[in-house]
């Protein structure tokens, strides 16, 4: 089977280790909208579930292991669904294929699916809801609230909105679109600087009492907000950006999660395709592509950061894996309660991502890899200023 789209040719009998040989760039997504928080811009090629393109470590069974986020048991690796309604190049993926990918992920053992009302808005939840309908009671799904989105039209207003009454309306919409009577893990997408976290927790508690929400978490919160939220209503997970290239969370957030017994879910575990090996020092991004305005992907920083990619490729050769599997396996090796959620719109890439659960490091190997990783300085801010401003925010004190 060959797959051609003008940029890529794949043959499931002959394709070699590197799974991505090109990059699709260009999107009309404003940085401050935060809707660009996708796992990666993916190639538009398709791969049937009968073949694994470019994968040296691939899961063909459902035995990928389980992990616990607090008391919530999920698969060792999840899938981020964000890009399935629209990719960075503004193309709309073929919806039946996205549903096929999600269902195949379940067949391969994935039981943790991540989405949000803001992705689309709304459309992403609809895609996930349709995909999981045959096995809804056998998986865990997340969604998120918190952006200032009109619940009827989907029109985005400025900033955030975590007023209790808005949270409840937002969740009702999510439940309808997901085709379910409960959300297993509900996140506040970003901390609202106008609403005390105790009020947010109160609204979520009301939803829990009604059986509409089973667990809750925060995304990109400030440290004190984590403590206050957990004291008010125990948190199940924190979802922050974390990868081999973005290790800020190791300073305070991950130690705090360990102290409080809170799980951790890394978004962008492949750093927006950087860690897959498909990007090189000569890669150019179209003006609308999110990465074109992200300091880490500037020409000078990208050239410097290739040191990390070369490290990943060396370890991929050593572990008989594809490059993208190394950073995913590395994340899972950091703590038993860390569950990455890579996203994709390509069947073969999903299969590779799931296959990362087969890549194991011995204690000596992990020490060696971490030492090499620590010696590399990643240059460039992880997000543009306008987007980064929403991270690490502390909720106001309750008066």
Image (spheres, rainbow, N blue to C red):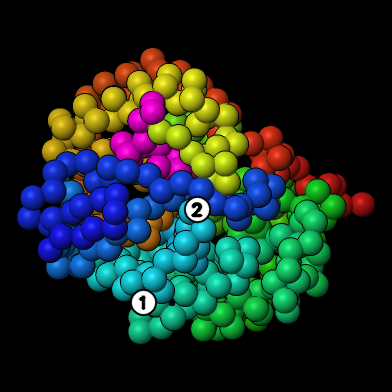
In front of the other: 1 or 101? 1
Real-space Cα separation, disc 2 to disc 1, in angstroms? 19 Å
Tag 2: Cα neighbours inside 10 Å, few (<14), some, or many (≥20)? many
Farthest residue toward the top? 375
Q: Which mark is residue 281?
A: none
In x, y percent, where is residue 91?
47, 61
The residue identified by callout 2 is: 88
Q: Which residues are magenta?
A: 264-282
In front of the other: 335 or 300? 300
In x, y percent, where is residue 85?
49, 67
Identify whether 195 is placed above or below 132. Answer: above
Within the magenta stretch, is there residue 276? Answer: yes
Tell me the quarter of the picture where residue 72 sits: bottom left
In front of the other: 215 or 300? 300
- Give yes or no for contact between labels 2 and 1 (Cβ–Cβ under 8 Å): no
**Residue at x 66%, y 74% (from the top left corner):** 171
Q: Is residue 86 left or right of residue 244?
A: right
Tag 1: Cα neighbours inside 10 Å, few (<14), some, or many (≥20)? few
Would you say the magenta stretch is mainly helix, strand or loop?
loop
In x, y percent, where is residue 248?
54, 31
The residue identified by callout 1 is: 96
Within the magenta stretch, is there residue 243? Answer: no
Tell me the quarter of the picture where residue 393 sits: top right
Q: Secondary structure at mark 1?
A: helix
Identify whether 1 is placed above or below 154. Answer: above
In x, y percent, where is residue 330?
32, 37
């Amino acid at each position: 089977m060959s797959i051609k789209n003008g940029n890529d040719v794949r043959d499931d009998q002959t394709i070699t280790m590197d799974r991505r040989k090109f990059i699709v760039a260009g999107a009309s997504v404003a940085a401050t909208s935060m809707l660009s928080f996708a796992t990666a811009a993916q190639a538009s090629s398709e791969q049937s579930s009968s073949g694994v393109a470019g994968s040296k470590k691939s899961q063909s069974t459902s035995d990928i292991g389980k992990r616990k986020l607090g008391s919530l048991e999920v698969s060792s690796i999840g899938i981020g669904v964000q890009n399935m309604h629209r990719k960075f190049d503004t193309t709309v993926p073929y919806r039946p294929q996205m549903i096929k990918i999600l269902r195949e992920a379940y067949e391969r053992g994935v039981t943790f699916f991540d989405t949000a009302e803001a992705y689309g808005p709304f459309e992403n939840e609809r895609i996930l809801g349709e995909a999981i309908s045959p096995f809804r009671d056998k998986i865990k799904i997340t969604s998120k609230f918190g952006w200032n989105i009109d619940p009827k039209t989907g029109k985005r207003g400025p900033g955030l909105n975590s007023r209790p009454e808005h949270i409840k309306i937002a969740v009702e919409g999510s439940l309808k679109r997901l085709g379910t009577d409960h959300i297993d893990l509900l996140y506040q997408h970003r901390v609202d600087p106008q609403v005390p976290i105790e009020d947010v927790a109160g609204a979520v508690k009301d939803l829990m009492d009604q059986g509409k929400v089973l667990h809750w978490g925060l995304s990109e919160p400030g440290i004190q907000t984590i403590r206050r939220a957990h004291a008010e209503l125990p948190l199940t997970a924190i979802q922050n950006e974390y990868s081999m290239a973005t290790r800020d969370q190791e300073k305070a957030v991950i130690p705090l999660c360990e102290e409080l017994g809170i799980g951790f879910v890394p978004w962008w575990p492949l750093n927006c395709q950087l860690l897959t090996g498909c990007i090189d020092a000569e890669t150019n991004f179209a003006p609308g592509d999110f990465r074109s305005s992200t300091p880490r992907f500037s020409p000078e920083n990208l050239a410097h950061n290739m040191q990390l990619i070369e490290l990943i490729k060396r370890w991929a050769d050593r572990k008989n894996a594809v490059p993208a599997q190394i950073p995913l396996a590395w994340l899972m090796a950091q703590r038993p309660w860390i569950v990455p959620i890579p996203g994709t719109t390509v069947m073969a890439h999903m299969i590779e991502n799931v296959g990362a659960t087969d890549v194991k490091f011995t204690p000596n190997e992990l020490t060696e890899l971490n030492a090499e990783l620590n010696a590399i300085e990643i240059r460039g801010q992880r997000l543009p200023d306008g987007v980064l401003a929403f991270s690490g925010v502390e909720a106001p004190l309750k008066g």
